[in-house]
Image (spheres, coloured by chain):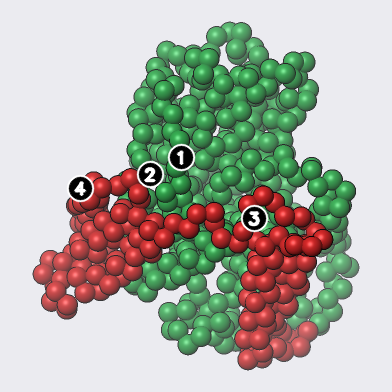
Chain colours: A red, B green
Amino acid sequence: MGRANKRDFYAGGLMILIGLGAALEGQHYNIGTMRQMGPGFFPIALGVILVLIGILIAGASFTGGVEDGDTAMPTKPDWRGWLCIIAGPLLFILFGKYGGLAPATFLCVFVSAMGDRTSTWKGAFVLASGVTFFGVLVFAYVLKVPFAILKFFNQVLF
Amino acid sequence: MIETALSGLWYGFSIALEPHNIMWCFVGVVIGNMVGVLPGMGVLATISILLPLTFAMKPVPAILMLAGVYYGAQYGGAICSILLNLPCHPPHAVTCLDGFPMTKQGRGGVALGVTMLGSFIGASWGITEMIFLAPILVQVALQFGPWEICSLMLLGLLAGSTLARGSPLKGVAMTVFGLLLGIVGSDVNTGTPRFTFGITELYDGVEIVALALGLFGIAEFLKSVNQKIEINLQYTNVRLRDLRPSKADLRQAAFPMLRGTLIGSLCALIPGTGPTIASFVSYATEKKISKTPERFGGGAIEGVACPEASTHSSVQGDFIPTMSLGIPGDSVMALLLGALIIQGIIPGPQLIREHPDIFWGLIASFWIGNIMLVVLNVPMIGIWVKLLTIPYRYLYPSALFFVCIGVYSANNDLFLVGETLAIGLFGYLLLILGFHPAPILLGFVLGPRFEENFRRAMLLARGDIFWFVERPISAVFVGLCVVLILGQIYVRLRRPKAVEIFTPAEADAE
């Protein structure tokens, strides 16, 4: 006993939260009867089950003992990598909406490539250009995905 | 029975040998082989990227291609394990133990050759098993009412979440979370929007492509970025003529291959125990019955032949419950079922009768695909080895683009890209907290059908839940569920060490 395994403790906590949320949200729907179940029955039932499992996970965290280097966070937070990877899809959405497929692809690949500590500006630039070229070729011309290649706000240029 | 099987198979070959079907099968196995070799690319992510592209295809070529990716990746994964000592594909993690020492002794080529032979034998057996077993299972399953379907699904869900990697409790939690995600959207019976929080895009439910790409694409990239993988290329110089095993090697590997095949095909029949467990069990068995167990870990050829044969036999066998009962054994199968559902095909026992082209075409394509893979792998080994040198810093940004465009083309909607990102971030949180997100997909795919059947069952039984144990077949499934849960509790209380044999596979989630 004594200290809990932090990771399991938080894991259980998260499941309890999700379960509670699901069960509470499920109250808004009609539960129905055992014979004629309404749309609310399953959400509430699953929510309650998840809360119970969460309690078991959190409870077991006190019995398992603490492993070496047990933290809730990964050993070395890697903000650069994370931010660049998250920025990739965000830029894809933003520039996909206002700029078209080509700039969206280029920026998505370029920025996310900079997340790796071993990559260089030049390498990322070449990679992004290459992926943009093939991406446009394959998706816009061969597969004909409906996505303007280049546009300026709502003005489709390509 | 043999007659129907043979005529079915004949019909299957006529489907699978149609030029465009054979082409897509080829595309599938080549892509699969490629991602299998590449360290840091998963089968699940690849299939989900390709999934939106199959929307415009006919169902048969779509499913042939996606299935090809799955078994093609198994051939590639073995190369990665044997030559680089990288257990990046869980089913092949155990092959590293003896495959890499063989490589260091300069016998890597032989290990690869034996692997390919074993893979082919294992796969052929798995396919044969499917030809004969699937129709029998269907005969039984056609008698099922909603009670049996429900309790069978419950068994599949429980087995899939507790027998896979990691803590069983956390696995069940992920399955329940997946079931909850499956609820999102309009209720089938009443049309009430559930868990949509006023977002119109969620009325159709969570998009399976977004879910899979978030969990197995973006979350994996977040986990793997800047994680130094030491890639040692010094032994990768394998030439074609090195592949041929000597007579003595073959004699040594023959029985382990057969044993592995058998273990793999048994594992495939138990829902939830996929190729990963099959390979570990067969390695452990082989070591136990060997007269010279001390050779294991130092380059014993049996230690390569047995797990590889069992992996492939189990990979093909995995398709049996998926195609005949509509119950996927693991997350890859769940994704393939999702692909079928998107094509408007309802999985279940009626599939073989209503869509014989899919069922028999798929079986025939397995054989064609496996032959293609052997042919591809033997002379092209040099090219695959070259692929190993692609650094991760080029891989993941390109993959990220494929994730974005793939999910966009699922519905031509940029909202889905945001949905994927959100799911990916949450998936990474789950990974940090020690969850394996694979069972989420299982719950997600089975959830809606489970709920529908459960509600129907309760309606027909006039609200009496005991019908589930009063009907004999259903009672057997419920009983198996109880045995499964009690077994897990027993293992946990009595022998916590027993689970540890599986921990090496935990190093990398799929």
Q: Is residue B427 visible?
A: yes
- Name the residue type under label 4: Lys
Give the side of residue B505 with respect to residue A91, left or right. right
- Name the residue type under label 2: Tyr
- Name the residue type under label 1: Ile
Chain letter belonging to callout 2: B
Q: Which dot, 3 or 2, sits closer to the camera?
A: 3
Q: Which residue position holds label 2?
A: B392
The mark that comes first in sequence, 2 or 1, is 1
Secondary structure beneath label 1: loop
Coordinates of residue B79 in the picture (x, y in percent): 48, 30
Q: Which residue position holds label 3?
A: A70
Mark seen at residue A90: none
Q: Residue at 56% of width from left, 82% of height from top? A: B195
Give the side of residue B225 with respect to residue B252, left or right. left
Mark seen at residue B229: 1
Secondary structure beneath label 4: helix
The mark that comes first in sequence, 4 or 3, is 3
Q: Residue at 87% of width from left, 73% of height from top? A: B466
Q: Which dot, 1 or 3, sits closer to the camera?
A: 3
Q: Are marks 4 and 3 on the same chain?
A: yes
Chain letter belonging to callout 1: B
Q: Which residue position holds label 4?
A: A122
Q: Are marks 2 and 1 on the same chain?
A: yes
- Name the residue type under label 3: Asp
- The answer to whether residue B227 is above or below residue B302 is below
Q: CA distance from mark 4 to mark 1?
A: 23 Å
Q: Is residue B416 visible?
A: no
